[in-house]
């Protein structure tokens, strides 16, 4: 990864108005937004088939005040959503960006649904930790793969060029910090160059780069990385080279519920509907309603770095709505027991400790008191036979720190000024999750990718002289 000074003889083979690096949700949505404003972008993607972390996600996008919410009688507002995001991150994120994303979220989700045919509906039945309203929007199968498929269809229908097997390796930047173009490398090692009038970095964070993870996230250096391997921190490295302001590099989304050894995401809805996690000693060790991101480190701190998700038939039936869960079930990750005693024997847990754990939950539900970790239990959510169990571990899903941007997705220098024609969004940009692993509110990842991505596309188009939608 290099920054190349532009000098005589550096003529580009092709010149386009806008280059976008990365064809995940961020890059594709940015391209659609620029197109709406009359700008044809070229999206450069290192993989042969665009997938990104987006295709590995559940594809849940938070948005407040949508018609999908209104149809289901959910009263929500951008103010409430912004407050939920800030409460979770300890008020560490840039309030202007949080407000801009919350305010734009409904419009972007409805635009993708109505203009580009992304089949969103509202995910109902439970709330993720920290959200006070039902505001997750997802496609019917609840998979990022389906979201990516819909976005790729939209991009194709809009006639946007996505160049695959095109890994951007260098940026050409002049003395004033203006990006003039990029070099890309093909799988056979050959190189091409493209000149551009504006550049959007949509190439996500550094989760796939063990060296950068060790430097910025030492507590998760041995955690399994469950995001896309192409996220090598290129935007971060270019930003460093250009003197950009880099913020919240210790921020990330972990997840405390990855089925082992199947490596399938088990939806946190299992916990929010009443499930619990115990360690190999049969004891609970945390408030499972605190947040699944910080739960990764808590699970990894247990003996063997594993925990058991325990739940019952009611929760199992509800979780079958999620394709990932169905896949885990088919793969044999979900085990079933008629009694707690059978479960203790089947999982190799100390029987007395497990019975104590369940007795304590019953007592807490009856008394209405919170447990020592701060979780409250209700009588209607208490687990009853038959029981289910899944062995899980903690994993790193993606990083949340990156290039500091304005609420127009313009990349900032260390002195607070903006680069003339450089934009970043999604995992490439500083997110809204504070500075550690506990500030991640569910949906912050795709919020930044999709909503800030749309803003980046629109603002890049404005930079190129387009003031109104085509
Ligand atoms: C298992 C899992 C579940 C998740 N679930 C959710 C969820 O439900 N809701 C939510 O909000 N978030 C979720 N997330 C986070 C979410 O997936 C990410 O925040 C989001 O996908 C980031 O989008 P992006 O477009 O920035 O990056 P990506 O989708 O990763 O796309 C970046 C693209 O850039 C390409 N690229 C990288 N470097 C270069 C280069 N030098 N040249 C060319 N191309 C390059 C990559 O190959 C990749 O295709 C989840 C993450 C994981 C791993």
Image (spheres, grey):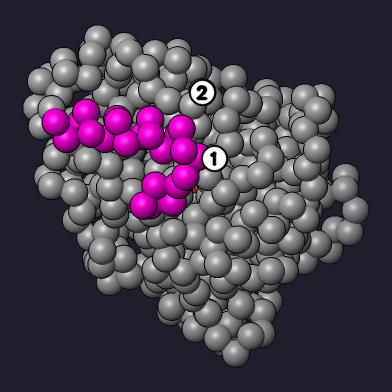
Q: Is residue 448 visible?
A: yes
Check the image and name the residue furthest to the bottom.
415
Is residue 194 positioned above or below 290 on the image? below
Residue at disc 2, CB closer than 8 Å to ligand 1? no
Q: Give me the residue at 35% from left, 55% from top.
A: 207
Check the image and name the residue furthest to the right.
468
Which mark is on residue 449?
A: none
Q: Which residues are magenta?
A: 352-374
**Which numbered disc, 2 or 1, marks the residue that appears first in the sequence?**
1
Q: Is residue 21 shown left or right of residue 383? A: right
Q: Main secondary structure of the magenta part?
A: helix
Q: Is residue 149 shown left or right of residue 205? A: right
Q: Decide whether residue 98 is among the magenta residues.
A: no
Front one among 106 and 352: 352
Other residues around mark 1 within 10 Å, as few (<14) / some (14–19) / many (≥20): many
Q: Is residue 126 shown left or right of residue 183? A: right
Write down the residue under mark 2: 380
The residues tagged by marks 2 and 1 sit, at their Cα atoms, a distance apart of 18 Å
Write down the residue under mark 1: 128
Is residue 248 positioned above or below 346 on the image? below
Rendered location of residue 145, percent (x, y): 48, 28
Rendered location of residue 351, percent (x, y): 13, 27
Q: Give me the residue at 66% from left, 44% from top.
A: 132
Is residue 421 positioned above or below 437 on the image? below
Quadrant (top left/top right/bottom left/bottom right) for the N terminus = bottom left
Residue at disc 1, CB closer than 8 Å to ligand 1? no
């Amino acid at each position: 990864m290099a920054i190349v000074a532009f000098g005589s003889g550096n003529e580009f083979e092709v010149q386009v108005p806008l280059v976008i690096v990365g064809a995940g949700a961020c890059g594709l949505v940015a391209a659609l937004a620029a197109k709406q404003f009359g700008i044809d972008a070229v999206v450069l993607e290192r993989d042969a088939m665009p997938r990104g972390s987006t295709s590995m996600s559940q594809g849940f996008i938070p948005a407040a005040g949508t018609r999908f919410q209104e149809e289901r009688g959910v009263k929500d507002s951008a103010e409430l959503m912004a407050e939920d995001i800030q409460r979770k991150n300890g008020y560490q994120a840039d309030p202007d960006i949080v407000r801009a994303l919350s305010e734009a979220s409904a419009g972007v989700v409805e635009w993708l649904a109505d203009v580009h045919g992304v089949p969103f509906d509202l995910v109902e039945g439970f709330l993720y930790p920290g959200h006070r309203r039902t505001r997750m929007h997802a496609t019917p199968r609840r998979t990022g793969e389906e979201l990516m498929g819909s976005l790729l269809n939209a991009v194709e229908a809009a006639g946007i060029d996505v160049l695959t097997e095109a890994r951007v390796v260098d940026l050409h930047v002049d003395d004033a910090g203006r990006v003039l173009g990029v070099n890309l490398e093909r799988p056979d090692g050959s190189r091409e160059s493209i000149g551009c009038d504006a550049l959007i970095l949509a190439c996500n964070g550094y989760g796939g780069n063990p060296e950068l993870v060790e430097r910025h996230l030492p507590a998760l250096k041995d955690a399994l990385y469950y995001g896309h391997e192409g996220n090598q921190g290129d935007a971060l490295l270019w930003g460093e080279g250009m003197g950009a302001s880099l913020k919240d590099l210790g921020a990330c989304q972990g997840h405390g519920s990855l089925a082992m050894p199947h490596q399938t995401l088990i939806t946190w809805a299992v916990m929010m509907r009443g499930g619990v996690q115990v360690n190999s000693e049969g004891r609970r060790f945390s408030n499972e309603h605190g947040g699944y991101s910080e739960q990764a480190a808590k699970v990894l701190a247990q003996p063997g770095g594993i925990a058991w998700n325990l739940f019952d038939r009611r929760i199992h039936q509800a979780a079958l709505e999620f394709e990932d869960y169905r896949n885990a079930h088919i793969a044999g990750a979900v085990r079933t027991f008629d009694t707690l005693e059978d479960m203790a024997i089947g999982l190799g847990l100390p029987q007395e400790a497990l019975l104590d754990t369940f007795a304590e939950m019953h007592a807490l539900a009856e008394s209405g008191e919170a447990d020592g970790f701060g979780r409250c239990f209700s009588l209607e959510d208490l687990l009853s036979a038959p029981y289910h169990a899944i062995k899980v571990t903690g994993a790193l899903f993606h990083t949340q720190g990156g290039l500091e941007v304005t609420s127009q997705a313009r990349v900032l220098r260390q002195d607070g000024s903006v680069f003339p024609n450089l934009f970043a969004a999604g995992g490439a940009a500083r997110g809204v999750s504070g500075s550690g692993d506990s500030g991640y509110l569910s949906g912050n990842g795709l919020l930044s990718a999709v909503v800030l991505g749309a803003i980046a596309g629109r603002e890049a188009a404005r930079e190129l002289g387009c003031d109104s939608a085509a």
